[in-house]
Amino acid sequence: MIEFVKKGLIKKGKILDICCGAGTNSIYLVKNSFSVYATDISPKAIQYAKKNSETRKSKNKSFIAEFYQFIFQ
């Protein structure tokens, strides 16, 4: 995915990161001007993702454990 972004092969826009884990890909995408919604079934993974997002000063605030909580605009 990183190579696709670096080569400009993915059009910037909204991304849904399913099974985001610690949020590494989501954070990378946000830092490259994507709007990212991230979800994981594990509340612990979401905690890690939120902490990683804060540590890396990412603007992604959309880390949700329960998929049905997403509100898409």
Image (tube, helix red, strand yellow):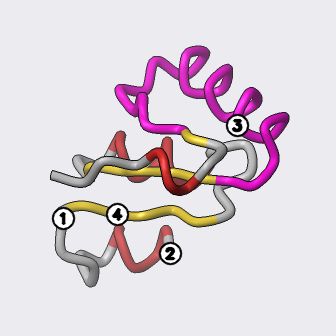
Instruction: Give the crowd class for mark 4: few <14, some 14-19, many >=20 residues within 10 Å.
Output: some
User: Residue flagged by tag 4: what amino acid is it?
Assistant: Ile
Residue 7's image quarter? Answer: bottom left
Name the residue that disc number 1 marks: 12
Residue 50 belongs to the span the image colors magenta: yes
Q: Nearer the viewer, mark 1 or mark 3?
A: 3
User: Residue flagged by tag 1: what amino acid is it?
Assistant: Lys
Q: Which residues are magenta?
A: 40-63
Residue at figure coordinates x 39%, y 79% from the top left: 4
Q: Secondary structure at mark 1?
A: loop
What's the mark number on residue 1? 2
> Which numbered disc, 4 or 3, marks the residue that appears first in the sequence?
4
Name the residue that disc number 4 marks: 15
Name the residue that disc number 3 marks: 46
User: In the picture provided, is 60 more to the left or to the right than 45?
Assistant: left
Q: Position of residue 19 (x, y in %)?
A: 68, 63
